[in-house]
Image (cartoon, rainbow, N blue to C red):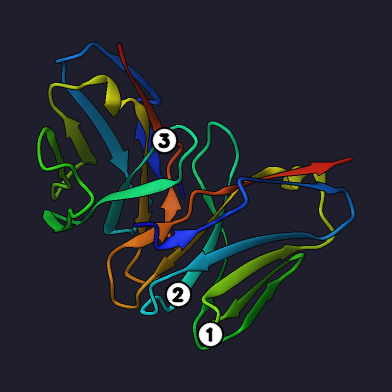
Amino acid sequence: NAGVMQNPRHLVRRRGQEARLRCSPMKGHSHVYWYRQLPEEGLKFMVYLQKENIIDESGMPKERFSAEFPKEGPSILRIQQVVRGDSAAYFCASSPGLNNEQFFGPGTRLTVL
Amino acid sequence: DQQVKQNSPSLSVQEGRISILNCDYTNSMFDYFLWYKKYPAEGPTFLISISSIKDKNEDGRFTVFLNKSAKHLSLHIVPSQPGDSAVYFCAASVAGGFKTIFGAGTRLFVKA
């Protein structure tokens, strides 16, 4: 049973470009969470999704950021018109349901030049 | 507004001794608490959890203690091993809620 998979592991973008981060949850997990970790800081919740539905996006910046979890395929975190402040590690986690521990992927390290 | 606080950014312990990592929270609605461990360039991995109906949960070398009145929990690792050197995150959530709130982490160094 493969763990949570994220790709790419490292992503470099220039200011103004788009970044697409992908997350495949563990088999059987229908709950996906995205977190951002800035240097020397903890994990900040961004968004929680179930298949085809955004349940809670209260941690997501209102502009330029969007997330989806389609019926088929991985969850996508999309950042449009990236700025240097978007440089961070983005972690995806999945769980089989609420109130279960979350299983994390290895993260995508985004660097904006 | 930091609802989950880990006030010690780092901790250094001798191998074989006890490591105690502390965590405080402000939201009295939290009723489920977790500890995650993170190595560099990897995602966090779940370590141990505790529900608010308990005040202690033990799993091998790891024990989590919860003091609800003080809104405080701690993770004890005994005996500490060099492989325990990592960043430890405390996290809290509300039953039926969607968000898990993480602390800033404590970096543990276990010296051989």
Asked whether B36 or A103 is in front, the reply is B36
How far apart are the alpha carbons under marks 3 and 2?
24 Å
Q: Amino acid at mark 1?
A: Ser
Asked if B42 appears above or below B6 in the picture, the reply is above
* Quarter of the image that includes the N terminus of chain B: bottom left
Q: Are marks 3 and 2 in contact (CB under 8 Å)?
A: no
Q: Is residue B26 left or right of residue B49?
A: left
On residue A107, which mark appears? 3
Residue at (59, 78) in percent of width and height: B66
Asked if A66 appears above or below A83 in the picture, the reply is below
Q: Amino acid at mark 2?
A: Tyr
Which subunit holds the residue at mark 1? B
On residue B32, which mark appears? 2
Which subunit holds the residue at mark 2? B
Residue B5 screen position, x and y as percent: 49, 58
First in sequence: mark 2 or mark 1?
Answer: 2
How far apart are the alpha carbons under marks 2 and 1?
15 Å
Dots 2 and 1 on the same chain: yes
Residue A77 lies in quadrant: top left
Report the residue that reaches farthest toward the bottom: B53
Specify few, some or many for label 1: CA neighbours under 10 Å numbering under 14, 14-19, or 20 or more.
Answer: few
Which subunit holds the residue at mark 3? A
Q: How many marks?
A: 3
* Quarter of the image that includes the C terminus of chain B: top right
Q: Is residue A10 left or right of residue B58?
A: left
Residue located beneath label 1 in the image = B69
Viewer-side label of 3, 2: 2
